[in-house]
Image (cartoon, rainbow, N blue to C red):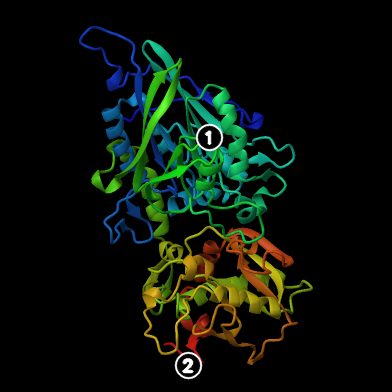
Amino acid sequence: MPLNRRKFLKKSAATGAGVAVAGAAAAPSATAAQTAKGPRPAKRYSLTVMGTTDLHGNIFNWDYFKDAEYTDAKGNAKGLARIATLVEQVREEKGRRNTLLIDAGDTIQGTPLTYYYAKVEPITAKGGPVHPMAQAMNAIGYDAVALGNHEFNYGIETLRTFEEQCDFPLLGANAVDAKTLRPAFPPYFMKTFKVPGLPPVKVAVLGLTNPGIAIWDKAYVQGKLAFPGLEEQAAKWVPKLRSMGADVVVVSAHSGSSGTSSYGDQLPYVENAAADVARQVPGIDAILVGHAHVEIEELIVTNEETGRPVVLSEPLCYAERLTLFDFELVFRKGRWHVESVKASLRNSNTVEDHPYIGKLLDDEHAKVVAYVNQVVGTATEPLTTVEARYKDAPIIDLITKVQEDVVKAALAGTEHAALPVLAQASPFSRTSEIPAGDVTIRDLSSLYVYDNTLVAKLMTGAQLRAYLEYSAEYFVRTAADAPVDVTGLTNANGRPDYNYDYVSGLTYDIDIAQPAGSRIKNLAYGGAPLDDAQKFVLAVNNYRANGGGAFPHVASAPELWAESTEIRTRIAEWVTAKGVLDPRDFASVDWKLTRNGTPVF
C-alpha cells in the first residue's frame, strides 16, 4: 500500500518568505482522550518530530561500488527505503497527525545514483526525470529539509530543479542573496497541530546550512549567494518565529556540534556550530544536527541566557538511523509550554525496505547498476587503497597522473605551458580495489568517491614545502624506537583521510619522529633540492583549491585554469583511452615515511 503523500503550499523562494502549512485536524494524543466522566478539554499534548540527515543519495541498502547489498562491520543497514518503514511504524504508534518529519541536509550528492541523475541523465534536461531522492522523500512524506553544503555541488540550476520537484520546502535561513542579503530559500516551515477544545499547537522548523559552501562551491555561488553564520541568523529568526506564535521551535542545522572548523582563517564563522547555537540563542527547544556524520542520540546543551535545556540529536548518516524528538506540552496560563523533550534513535537494521519505495524506484536503481558496471578497460594487476594512507600506492598515482595529463593539455600553448605540472590527491577510501582484468566505472568511482572538479594553481617551491608540512600533520608522532601500529599511525588530531595529500612530481620523506611542522625531509624536484623560488603548476581538486582543509597558500594562489568535468569522469576517460591499466604507465615512488631518516616500511 503506498505511503501517504502530502502537498505543501510553498511561497516563492525569491521572496524569502517562510513556508506555512495548515495541518488538518490532528488526532488527539493519548492525554487528550475523553475521560470516564465525559469529554473535557485536554491540558497536555504529545508531539514527535522525526529526523534524518546526510542521506547522500542512499535510497536502498545497496553498495553501488561493490555491486552488492551494503554491509559493514557493525551490522548497519542504510537507505530511505528502510527509513520509510521506520517512519510508518512511528506514525502508527504516535498517530500520524501528531508527527513531523524533517531532514538536516546533504541529500542529492554521494552515490552513483545521485551522480547519474545530475550528470548522465540530468534532471535539468528538457523533459528530464524526477530526481529519485525527490520521489522517495515525497512518497515518505517529509515536511521540510534543510540545505546541506553538498546540495550545491552540481550548481544552482540542479538544486533549483530538485527544489521544484519536492513536495516539501528546502530551508536555509542563512543562504541569502549576495546582493540584497534577503533569504534565497525559505528560512522556516511552520505547521499547526489542532487539539480539540484548546488552541492549536504551532511548530516552527528553522533551517540553517553551512557557511563553508562559500568556500567549497565558490565557483557556483560566488557573487550569487552568501552564507552568514548560523548563530547570527538563528538569533534573527527564532524571535520572529516566537512572535508569530510558535509554541515549539526546532532547528534543522547542517552543522555539527563540536565547535570545530576546517575553514582556517578564511571565514569568520564556525563550521560545526549547532551546540553554539543552542547555547547562545534563546527560544530553541531542539536541534536536529547534521554534517559531521557522527551518531549522537541525545546531547543536552544549556542556553546561557535562559538556563533552559536544548536537546540535540544527530542520527547516523546514509539513512542508517532515525532521530525521534518526543515533546510533551502542557497548556497553562492561556498558552502551550514545552514541558520536556527527549531524543532517541531508531536503527534501520531492525526493519526491511518498505515495498512501495522498491516498486517506485526499482527502474532507476537498475539503470544506475547497469551504468556503473560498464567495462571501460583491463587492469594488468590488482590495485588497492588498503595501505595508501601510509605508503605511496600506485592506485593514488593513477589519480595524480590523470590530473597532470589533463592540466598539461589544458595549458598547452599558453604562457604557462613550460612550467612543471605537479598534482595533489588524497586516499579517500580505505577499501577501494581495482581487480586484475575488467575495469568498470564502479571500480573507478570507488577510487574517487567525491564529485570534485579540477583546478590549476600557480605555486612556488616554498609554498609547496609549507603545503606538504601541513599535510604531514596527518601522521601521529612516533618515536624511532616505538612499535608501529598502522591503525593508530594516521588521523592525528582528528584529521580525516581526505585532508591528507600526496603531491606527485616531487620526492620527499615524511619523518614522523619529528614534531609537526618539521617533518618534510629531502624535498627535491628532478633529483635536485627544491628551489623555493621555482614556479610550479599544481593540479588540485576544487575542494582544496577553494580552501577546503585549510591547506596553506593554495586558496590564494593564482588560478590558471579550471573546468566543470568531474575528476572521476576524467579518470574513466583516461582508462578508456588507454584500454589497458598498467602501473608502468603511471606509478612512481615519490614519498615514504621515515623515523630519524630510517624508512618505517
Above or below, 520 relative to 106 = below
Indicate the position of residue 291 as horizontal and vertical percent values. 48, 51
Indicate the position of residue 306 as horizontal and vertical percent values. 51, 35
Instruction: Indicate the amino acid at tag 2.
Output: Thr
Cα distance between the residues tagged 1 and 2: 55 Å
Choose top left, top right, bottom left or bottom right for residue 481. Answer: bottom left
Indicate the position of residue 425 as horizontal and vertical percent values. 54, 71
Please name whichever residue, 376 or 515, is drawn nearer the observer in this view of the structure. Answer: 515
Q: Is residue 528 left or right of residue 244?
A: right
The residue at the point 27 percent across, 34 percent down is 89
User: Mark 1 or mark 2, which has the lower sequence index?
Assistant: 1
The residue indicated by pointer 2 is 598
Q: Residues within 10 Å of mark 1 (few under 14, many from 20)?
A: many
Image quadrant holding the C terminus, namely bottom left
Q: Is residue 554 left or right of residue 589?
A: right
The residue at the point 29 percent across, 33 percent down is 90
The residue at the point 70 percent across, 50 percent down is 222
Please name whichever residue, 4 or 39, is drawn nearer the observer in this view of the structure. Answer: 39
The residue indicated by pointer 1 is 206
The residue at the point 36 percent across, 73 percent down is 435
Is residue 420 at least partly visible in the picture? Answer: yes
Q: Which numbered dot is residue 6?
A: none
